[in-house]
Amino acid sequence: MTHWYYADTPKTRQGPVTTEAVLQLRQAGSIGDDTLMWREGLSGWLPLRDLSQELGAEAPSAQAPAPEPTVATPAAATASDDARWTLAPVELRADSLQNDAAGDAWRPVSEGGAAETPASSPYAPPAAPVAMADAVIQGGDVVLAGFRKRLAAYLIDGVIVGIAGMIVGGLIGGVIGGLMAISGAGGDATILLIQALSNILSLAIGATYYAWFHASQSMATPGKMAVGIKVVRLNGERISIARGVGRYFATILSAIPLLIGFLMAAFTQRKQALHDLVCDTLVVDKWAFTLHPELQRRELGTVTVVVLVIFALLLGLGMLAVLAAVGMAAFA
């Protein structure tokens, strides 16, 4: 008796089943003409339509039930420009029928047709290398992040880092102040020690925050994620943690003097600030260097506009408060 195996819609091998069972499945619409079939003696998996004579199956009629979604032929799944996935020939084993393990595997093959190492699962779908998170797609349009988007992201991150620094500083001040009070010591030396430790830890928090997020898979801090931008190397690759730490401390150069290094992002050709030029980095749209560059946005976006408006209002209120204080001092 002939034993048949077939691949269902999720590419899971089913069987063995008899020829009569195959015909019943075909008549019920559980399998279709594109369903891949195999039996011992065949060199590889074939669609059911190519085995119709052997099976004695009738040609499909208009009244036949609609078949299940067909299994996509492996040749249609393109992994890259120079590699395709195909169903490799079956390697028969003596115990294939007893163990129900007639061998087949999805294997990547080159243009010449030579099969490479099989995947671990017999029916695992092909994984295209370009779909990996770290894949860099060159040649597409790249939208550079302008000064206003970068400013909005920096304001969001500044609030996060500032709050974290205040919490750490308060804890350090409370612990050291309490210890000094218990020991009876104190004075200016205690205040200087607290300030020094707070400043050192604030720098450590800032460096860790920016370096870790910029070197992560998102390549962006929470502020940059909110406005839809990321930090990459000049070729679109993710930066390392070491480069992220160096980039953070390079922002000190951008701040001296008068924040000119930051303002350079509004005038340089690739919208790079001074610390970007020093560290060979770019700030681009989050969809740049990906499979979908068409999703990039040149407009500011709602989050950027809202953050900038709030910043402008707070800045205006601060300037009014300063002018009011100066005026009151002048008339005092």
Image (cartoon, rainbow, N blue to C red):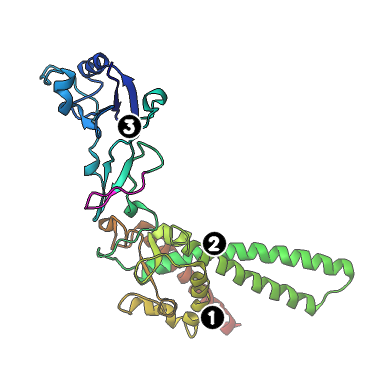
Q: Based on the displayed image, in which of its 4 quarters is residue 67 positioned?
A: top left
The residue that label 2 is drawn on is: 160
Between circles 1 and 2, the one closer to the viewer is 2
| Residue nearest the observer in this picture, 271 or 127 | 127
Q: Is residue 263 above or below residue 39?
A: below
| First-in-chain label (2 vs 3) | 3
| Labels 2 and 3 touching (C-beta < 8 A) | no
Residue in the image at 78% along x and 68% along y: 176
Residue at mark 2 to residue at mark 3: CA–CA distance: 46 Å
The crowd level at tag 2 (other Cα within 10 Å; few <14, some 14-19, many 20+) is some
Look at the numbered disc 3 and give the secondary structure of its residue: loop
Amino acid at the residue labelled 1: Gly
| Residue 107 located left or right of residue 252 | left
Between circles 3 and 1, the one closer to the viewer is 3
The residue that label 3 is drawn on is: 10
Residue in the image at 19% along x and 22% along y: 66
Residue at mark 1 to residue at mark 2: CA–CA distance: 34 Å
Amino acid at the residue labelled 2: Ile
Q: Which residues are magenta?
A: 109-118
Residue 120 in the image, given as x and y percentages of width and height: 41, 41
Q: Based on the displayed image, in which of its 4 quarters is residue 137 positioned?
A: bottom left
| Residue nearest the observer in this picture, 38 or 215 | 38
The residue that label 1 is drawn on is: 327
| First-in-chain label (1 vs 2) | 2
Which numbered marker is on residue 161?
Answer: none
| Residue 192 located left or right of residue 84 | right
Q: Is residue 147 above or below residue 220?
A: below
Residue at mark 3 to residue at mark 1: CA–CA distance: 77 Å
In the rendered image, the quadrant that contains the C terminus is bottom right
Residue 187 included in the magenta stretch of the image: no
| First-in-chain label (3 vs 1) | 3
